[in-house]
Amino acid sequence: MAKKNIVLLSMLAFVPISVIAQWIHLNPLVIFICSGLAIIPLAALIANSTEAIATVIGPTLGGLLNATFGNATEMIVAVVALKAGLVDVVKASLTGSIIANLLLALGLAFFLGGLRYSEQQFPPAVARLNASSLVLAVIVLLTPAAIQLTSQGLEISTLNNFSYAASILLLTFYFLMQVFSMRTHKHLYLLEEAEHGNNESPTEKVNVGLKIGVLLACTVVLVFVSEILVDSLEKAIVTLGLTSLFTGVILVPIFGGIVEFITCVTFAVKNKMELAVAVAIGSSLQIALFVAPILVLVGWIIHQPMNLSFNLFEVVAVTMAVVSLNSISNDGRSNWLEGVLLLITYAVLGTAFYFHP
């Protein structure tokens, strides 16, 4: 664990490197890579600080804090890109984050955990409920496409108005999910703590003031680094010869989500598969039910309209990811072959996005 922290802290060097690279006008691709690497340790520090504060302030407020800052990285990068008018890239990064969490993060967890243990288990009831909640997100993503296909001369304002209403409904459901998991049915979500609590070493005393300071400082720095990343993004896309769709769906989510990928794998190889599944699916739910609706409403406020009408192929890809998850999470068991199945699915979709014109 100490080795991982040293690596992440040493990666903070990319923060000043990315600032200098932009200041002296280096190749946009170099700036894009440096700022992307700078985001990784900042995301890790935000996640660690949030987790530490949550252990002190209790499960209810802690759960709310985790829900708010759980996808802070994706949220900040997306808001900065939205202000810059890169609406298509923002949409692509949202769908890409959902796909990466469900297929890449969970696939790696199932595969690497399955190499150490022939079969691993996780609570099927929670996994099934979370997977069903993702189906709601898919329904909302499919609806604008259905409206467009069944209408003639459709005005963009109609889709925008639908998106504002749907976003409020999604946020309502997300809020009720928090009530369900933290109040009325929290016993379902405390299973892993009951199972593993006795095996953990006594928790160290948390300096809450320091952690809050780190959380706020990293959030502010992340805003500046995100602006550098977004500023270099369009030029880097041209330099690489890639489409904005592939960059948004595949490349950007890897920078923002790599900390969660590492966390999932770490839990899996420790035979805590229920925690790995909770992180991967929970992160996807936060993006679909919280981050995306918030961005739609933020776009409305800053007069940079963003709606829930996504590229049809993106919607199909998210649907495939959710279907794959549902097919293997029903029994509450996992093995390395199921991990390979998810990884191959991700590779197929990644290849399709690469060749998509």
Image: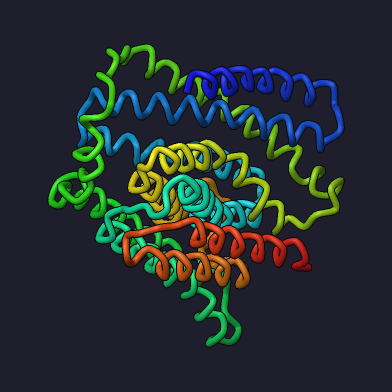
Q: Quadrant of residue 196?
A: top left
**Please, which colouring scheme is shown?**
rainbow
> In this view of the protein, which residue sits in the foreground, 255 or 220?
255
Q: Position of residue 220 (x, y in %)?
A: 52, 24
The residue drawn where x is 71% and y is 52% is 247
The residue drawn where x is 37% and y is 67% is 136
Q: Position of residue 149 (x, y in %)?
A: 56, 84
- Residue 215 placement, left or right of 63: right
Q: Position of residue 278 (x, y in %)?
A: 36, 48
The residue drawn where x is 79% and y is 48% is 237
Q: Position of residue 117 (x, y in %)?
A: 42, 48
Q: Do we see residue 310 in this rendering?
A: yes
> In this view of the protein, which residue sits in the foreground, 236 or 284?
284
Give the vertical position of 32 relative to 318 (above or below).
above
- Residue 310 placement, left or right of 231: left
Q: Quadrant of residue 309?
A: bottom right
